[in-house]
Amino acid sequence: MDPSKPKKPFHTRVVEYLAASRFFTFSALIHLVIIFLGGTVVLFKHYTEPPDFAASEGGLVSNDAQVEAPPEQPPDVSQQTFQPTAPQITAPTLSAISTTNLSTPTFQVAQVVPVIKAPSSDTMNKALERAMTGSARGVAGNLPAVMGGRMGGTARAQAMMMNGGKKESEEAVLRGLRWLVKNQNPDGSWGTAYKGAMTGFAFLSFLGHGETPVSPEFGPAVGKALDWLMKGGAKYEGRLSMQAAFNQPGVYEHAIATYALGEYYTMTKDERVADLLTKAVGYIVDGQSPDGGWVYGYSKEGDGDTSVSGWQIQALKAAHLTGLEMPGVDQALDKAMLDLKRVQGPKGGFGYRTKGDGYSLAGVGVLCTYFWKQKKDESVRNGIEFIMSETDKEYPIEYQNEKANLYAWYYDTQACLMVGGAAWTKWNRLFQTEIVKAQAPDGSWPPMKGKSPGELQTQTAVNGALYRTNLCILMLEVYYRYMPSTK
């Protein structure tokens, strides 16, 4: 640089420098633009893409090793609340029943059965809580007064005191229920054969004590039984005998299980069972014989069978108490009363298929006659007198007597309580202590010597024990299970 020349301004010198090195300057600008754009993309991706280890389907998206969860601790079943699943029934419905007159109901099958929709768990629990909170008089929520005595310890105690029950009887019931829990099948049923009947019997025994799926001790067993009945009922299109068609024992099984499901609905208002129950009741209404009775296989040929009819009538009365107003139920019960009158003998007993004075069926006739309209008419009074007379003369209430008849005692006990008066005072004195005394240490009732009315009284296998234990429990629950009422 020549010092004699004047110094140029700084900005002039910068411009001359950039002009001399224009290629370098252009390259630098290009690189700055690239760096700026690249940084912008990186920042955008950072805020929009998930991390590599986002959880998906219970594991990780990345290749990190998946660690197995530690084993769970066994659940405390005493604190569990059972929430049975609600199966979908796709068979034709049996609920669309219409009647052309009061004596000859006709039966129509609709095309599609509505899907059983499970209410929310909150709805279910509220319904069950309402059933468990009865008043001091034992009337729980909307439960019919006749069933109010079973709900809650206070109501049961009051009913027992009123009807002559003893502390030992209630203790025997609890031992029996605990034996049933121990002998329940893993799938929720009971028995090795005739599971529809055996499960229905056990279910009735728990319900008779006011137990539901939310009960502290017995809730899990009740819930499992309900689940089994629901799943089987869906599979067999409403046939609670758990068979594709009704055979000879199937009509007993179906009626006993339907009876139990009807009581359950009345106690809980669990809408998940309403459609299945309606279908099951529909088979009974449709299966009634022209004379008003029922026969094997729900055939409509031949005279009505009083033994078969007894269970159908109890199931229909339970259906009536649900308040669902299922078509044909009341008309079928009215017609059944005509059949019972047809077979009642001159002494007050009841015949099998024709008029007669059979002891085994006398309680069936009396209970079912009174159970429906609750009137102490001549047939009821004559029947009670016949039962008491034959008990004194021929059929003592002795568990190991060769003429012992647990089937007859089941009906006689309820019939005498419903009628009340001197008959109940005497019967209660005879049967209560005997049944309690006969209970085995494990809570079941042992084989009997009496062979009437069938082998289940003497059978040593589990089905025999289930049959005897449930009938004895139901007998000892009589003080509160169904309250005598004129309503």
Image (cartoon, rainbow, N blue to C red):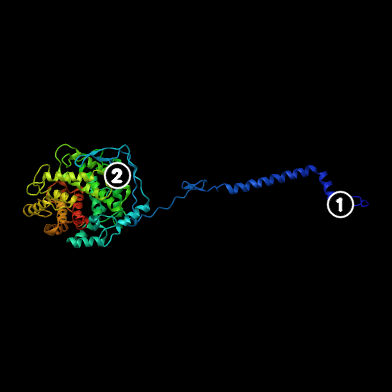
Q: In the structure shown, which secondary structural element does the residue marked by tag 2 occupy?
A: helix
Quarter holding the C terminus?
Answer: bottom left
Residue 122 locus on image (x, y percent): 37, 53
Q: Does the image show residue 154?
A: yes
Decide: few, some or many residues near mark 1? Use Cα within 10 Å; few <14, some 14-19, many ≥20: few
Report the front residue among 47 and 450. Answer: 47
Residue 101 locus on image (x, y percent): 21, 40
Report the front residue among 477 and 77. Answer: 477
Q: Which residue is mark 1?
A: 9
Spatial distance from mark 1 to mark 2, Cα to Cα?
A: 102 Å
Identity of the residue drawn at 78% across and 44% down:
24
Q: Amino acid at mark 1?
A: Pro
Placement of 166 over or under 84, stated as above or below: below
Residue 94 locus on image (x, y percent): 27, 40
- Is residue 371 left or right of 10 when viewed as pictured? left
Q: Which residue is mark 2?
A: 276
Q: Amino acid at mark 2?
A: Leu
- Sequence-wise, which precedes: disc 1 or disc 2? 1
